[in-house]
Structure formats: structure tokens, C-alpha cells
Amino acid sequence: MSATGGGLIIAARFPFGRYAATPWFRSRREHVGNVEWPPSPWRIARALLCTAHRLGDDVDAVVALVRRFAVVEPRYLLPPAGEVVYAQWMPQLEFDDHPLAGDRSENGHTLLDLDPDAELVVAWPGVQLHEPERDRLRRLLSATPFLGQSVSICELELRDALSAERSAHDGVAVPRSAEDEIANVQGERSVVRLLAPEPSVTREQLEVTTADGIVKAMPAPPGSRWVEYVRVIPRRPRPQPSEPFVAKVIHRLEGALRPPVEGPSHPEAGRPGRRGKVKPEKEKEVKLEELVYYATRFRVDADELALADDDLDGRAERLVITFDPPRPRPELRSLLAPVRRLTGPAIDCALRLESVVWAAQGGARAPSGRDEREHLLVFRLQSERPPLLADAIVVCEAFRRRLLGVAGRRLGADAIPVKLSGKRPNGDDARDDHSHIHVLAASAEGHVVDCLAVFCPAGLSRDEVILVRSVTLPALLGSAIRLLPTRDQRFSRPARLFRSHTPFLPVRHPKRRGGALRDTPAEQVAEELRRRGLPEPLAVRPLDGPWASFRTLRRAKQGAFPYLGAHGFELEFHEPVQGPIALGRNSHFGMGLFLPVS
């Protein structure tokens, strides 16, 4: 089924990655292997009618709407789906279904496991609706909470057209009478029967109840018909084993005689004092001969080496070696198993391997062409009493605390990934140039939090993504909070202009040196942009806002220097820059967030 511009098109996403629906003529005890996939037109019609009742909409108008598209059998684009079978405890057959029933038996149950971002597309070719009908259908779709069983939480949307061709991994389903439409589609074919409403279906027929089980025991309910569909599921190619490729290697340097690096001059240099002027320090810089020496030791090119001074003491704490393009692991055996000590002219320090960034993690693609790392996960926050944006640090800290709890229970307290905790197993800070997760909160209207994002510059593996998506938030204001995956682009949309959404908290005191003020908050913003690899801003302009009303202290770590103030800025760049941008103290907990403006 190719892209088309005509007809009625509905797209469905299942943000929790679960879909369950019992086909007609199957009992609730026949769940295993009997999921109705795709959802039948009859199920979709009854879901719309149910939503109309709940909203108090004109039910007769909805029935007329169902009759409009009942004259055509829909076509489906199916996202990849896998079966999940689990045990469900239910009352035994001779007992009723009372919640307090004591005797229960194990009953198998089947769900479909779907990608939360994948879409199921249902298209009725040739069906044209008037604008009032489209508005009513759009309102009903947005208010439909689930499709099938209540675990099948869904997001339904009315589309004007299919914007792209079918993905190579998507399946299709068409009526058997239209099998020629998918003659060229390769994959495993099967025939499924779906229930569809008749064009003359009535309101009473659509509202028939299945509570007593008698109607569902019929071959088909009144006002419906069975339609045979040909379903084609493409065969997925076997993954080809590939050689792991290395994008970056980081060694930790330990000892007093570490390699010197260029650093800032002494802050007291040139200032008069009791004993005269303090002599300016000589600039410390790395000579080319020293880099060549390191290159000889590790057998890599000299221009791929960098020394990092984490504590600004003039000597390197880390040796960072980057490969562009990435190199196969066998070629770097000497680099991944280095000598224990590094010696040279005025250099004598211990050397240990700190971390390896593989090609997919560092942003370069492996030869297979797949990058399975996720850098940004966004959730829509739903609650009757959502938390205030001024309490963003409370929301973000609560999310991270629960994330560490989930990871600790599943992996063990000593095996929590550094990218999630920001801590090494010994409890030390990761010192990874802010490449571990940032938890960010945003508000569309600037009052209450309606969106939460987890941003990890180093990228999250599939297992780490599963841990993040398993986190729930407590009822911060007494009302339950739901987190639904979404594709909101407000954090990552490229733009030339960014404005503070939460306050920027400086990390250092402004100082007056030589009659000039240094390390002002605006200068700290520009410096942090450079340190995080972002372009130099064209302008950093102060921005008025309710920054003083925000909470800036974390519950678990109070050292936030509140007397340095909370500030807002507008950033302007020469070229569009892609976010997220989070700077300053507590930027991993929602502070210092800048959102794109244009």
C-alpha cells in the first residue's frame, strides 16, 4: 500500500507498547495466540460510539459517520509486533468473578509488543468527509483512551494523507478481494477474518452489549459482516555479526608528575600585595614532541590525542583519543590494554583504562548502518494537579531518584549504569563532560509542567531506554501523574534563538580583576556552551522573568550557592543550533534549560 492523498486515514500509536484485543466469537479464556490484529473496523466503530457517549456528543451523528466509511473495507499498514504471553490468575469456572473470590486458576494471556513510536495506519480509500464530520471525528479520536482491552492505551489521530512509503519492516493487510494491491509485497502471508459494520448498521446494533455472553456466542452480531483479509508480515533479515568499532578511548592519569597542559594563569598574578607584585606564571602548554611521544607509545596518529585538565591544576587527568572514522577493536589492542605507567621527560604517572566509547555510542555509525542509541526521550505529563514549573527541580530530582531505584532493583545497586547515576561504582563523580543523563521539565504556557525529557549526550542503549520508560512519578500534589511517550520537538528543534525556560544558576563567583568584572553569569553561559561543544553565541542577552520564584535547591544536595542568584538569558547563534541546551549548576535536574524560539 503506497502513499495516497485521498480517502479517510487514521493513525494509531500505543505509547505503552502494548496491544490486546479478544476477537469476536472468542471467550475471555481463549486469549493465548488469539489477539485480533489488526483491530477490526467493527471495534473501531464501537470505540468511537463509546467515546461519543462519554463526551455527551450527538450519538446519532456518530452512527451516520460510521455508515459513511462502512461502505469501504479499510487497508492497514502494520508496525512490527511480537507476542508476549503471560499468566493471569482468574476465578475458577465454577465460581463467579467477584473480586473477593478465593479459588483462582492460572489463565494464559497474550499481548502484542509494539514500538511506542510506531504507527498503525488505517485507510478507507475514496471516503471523503465534510469538514464538520472531520472535526467531529478528530475530536472523538483524540478523546478515545484505548482500543481493545484497557491495557491498549492509544493515541489516535486523523491524517490528511500518508506522507511516506511503507517501511521495509512494516506489514500490510488488505481485503482478499484487493489482494492484487500487495502482489509485490514480500513476506509471510496469512488470512485473517475481521468484523466490519454493514452500511445500514443502526445505533441499537452498534450499542449491543456482550455482558451476558449470548450475543458474543453468535457467529456475527446483527448489523455486521465478516471480511477476509490477506495479511503480509515481512521477514526480517538475520542480523549480521559485525566487528565492534571504537570511536573514543579515555585513559585516567594518576600521580603528581602528570603531563602539563595549557591552563589559566594564577588568579593573583599581577596584583600588588604586601610583598610586591605576584609574578605572572608561565603558560603551561603541551609541546608537539610530547604528543608525538604519546603517539609512539600507542601507535595512533598524533592529531587524535587530547589531554583533559578536569580540576584546572595545570596537569592532565585524562588522555582522550578519538577516532574518526571509528576503528575495529583488534587494531587497538595495545590501546585497550595499555602499559601501567607512562614515563617521559618530567612525566611519571599511572595509567588505567577509564572508558571506551563504541561507534554507536559516540555518534558515528557502525558499518551495519544502524545506531541503536537513544539520545532524547520525551514524555507528556498528565495529571489533574500537575506540578508547577517553579518546582521543576523537584520533579526532575524525583524522576531521577525513582530511575535509580528501578535500575537498582533490576540490575543491583552496584551495577547501575554510570550514564544513569552520574557516579562511578566507588561513588566518585563520573567527570564525563556532562555526557550522562539530564532530566528536563518544560511547560507550554509557562505555569505547570506538561512535558518531561531525559537527555543523554552519550546515548542510551536499548536496556537503558527500557529502564527510563519504566519510571513513574509520585503524586507530587496529591494527584496521580502519568508519563506518556511523545514526539514533542520543543527540546530539540533547531533554532538560532533560544530563551531561558528555567533559571541559569552560576557555578562560580563573579570576580573583579584589574578593574574589570570577570566570570559574570553571561560569561559563564558562553563558557559552558564552548565546553559542551556548542557554537559560540552571537549574543548573550539578559532576560527578565520570574527566576527568583523557582526552587533551586535539591533535596539530596543542598550545596547550590543560592546567593549567586538565578538568571535568565536569550541566546542568539549565527546558524541554527539543535538542542537540548541545559547549562549551569543543577542542569542535570532541570535548571538552566533553554528552549528554541525561532
Image: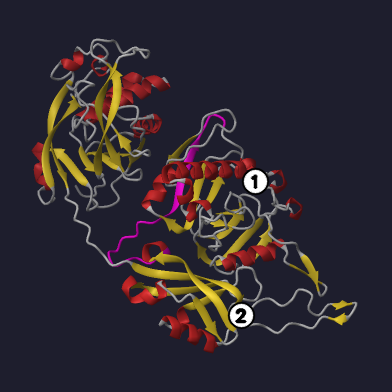
Between 452 and 264, which is closer to the camera in this rendering? 264
Helix or strand or loop: what does disc 2 sit on?
loop
Looking at the image, the residue that sits furthest to the bottom is: 289
Residue 145 location in percent, x, y?
38, 30
Whether residue 594 is visible: yes
Q: Which residue is labeled 2 in the image?
A: 260
Between 371 and 381, which is closer to the camera in this rendering? 371
Q: Earlier in the sequence, mark 1 or mark 2?
A: 2
* Residues in magenta, as a range: 362-385
Residue 219 location in percent, x, y?
13, 19
Give the label on residue 378, or none: none
Residue 226 location in percent, x, y?
13, 26
Image point 24% across, 62% down: which residue? 241
Q: Is residue 304 above or below residue 476?
A: below
Image point 81% across, 75% down: which residue? 514
Residue 469 location in percent, x, y?
42, 43
Helix or strand or loop: what does disc 1 sit on?
loop
Q: Is residue 521 above or below residue 35?
A: below
